[in-house]
Image (tube, rainbow, N blue to C red):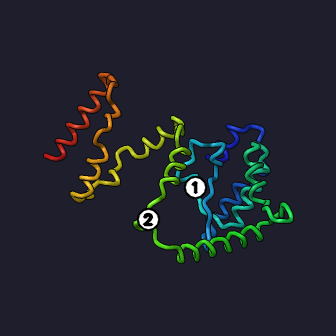
Amino acid sequence: MIKNLFISRFPQINLEALNCYLKHIEHCIENNEGYKEKHHILPKCLFPEYRLAKWNITKISASDHFIAHFLLWKLNISASLAQAWHLMSNRKSVEGLIKLNAEDYAKAKEEWRALASSRQKLAPKRLGWHQSEETKKKISEGNTGKVFPKDISKRYSEERLGKPSGQLGIKRSEETCKKISMSKKGRPSPNKGKKMSEEQKEKISKTRKEKNNRKD
């Protein structure tokens, strides 16, 4: 299936490199020990529709991950894969770019993982921690104007369809309810001035009826 997806989208693909890549991934899946990194078998830059598919995501060792991206570059189908391989195989230093091999890459990742773990243990707990107004403003400005592509929004919506809300069964305290109420006071309704189609009205009515029936 995966091989056919590659070939159907990229007829000019290097078949020898593709076979090596798929055999390598098969070997990596069988070897399930030690530190692992997430890898998309069909690269998400080329197959965004399978970005969240469970069968397309696997966990492989750092050295195997390094080799996998080398073989993807050898497929000779996209500049994005060449860029990914360049970023993975080169590291900046005071002397300039340093070329890495699979062993060096795996060692560097293991050291980074150990350092990050020790820092996390020493870091103060963030419970009750508040960001400064300046930081909030920067985050707000950075997110202003950002719009999710329609296909991604639709995919997220379809994945959540039929699943219970993360807030289901959680009882809020009176104080929390009061804070939520106060924060919404004075705000205009997001639907103010909007005219709903008959189809939208029917959907809302149907949803409310189903909720009422469950309560009964």
**Disc 2 and disc 1 in contact, CB within 8 angstroms:** no
CA separation, marks 2 and 1? 35 Å
User: Which residue is rendered at x = 67% and y = 59% of the image?
Assistant: 25
Q: Is residue 6 left or right of residue 153?
A: right
Mark nearer the viewer, 2 or 1: 2
**Foreground residue, 148 or 161?**
148
Residue furthest to the right in view is: 95
Q: Residues within 10 Å of mark 1 (few under 14, many from 20)?
A: some
Report the residue marked by disc 1.
Answer: 57
Q: Amino acid at mark 2?
A: Trp
User: Which residue is rendered at x = 68% and y = 74% of the image?
Assistant: 111
Q: Is residue 145 left or right of residue 8?
A: left
Q: Is residue 25 above or below residue 125?
A: above
Q: Is residue 110 above or below residue 159?
A: below
Mark closer to the chain start, 2 or 1: 1
At mark 2, the secondary structure is loop
Residue 81 lies, in percent from the top left, at: 73, 48
User: What label sits on residue 129 in the rendered view?
Assistant: 2
Q: Amino acid at mark 1?
A: Ile
User: Which residue is rendered at x = 29% and y = 39% of the image?
Assistant: 186
User: Which residue is rendered at x = 52% and y = 53% of the image?
Assistant: 134
Q: Is residue 131 above or below residue 214?
A: below
Q: Is residue 169 above or below residue 202?
A: below
Residue 105 lies, in percent from the top left, at: 74, 67
**Foreground residue, 47 or 168?**
168
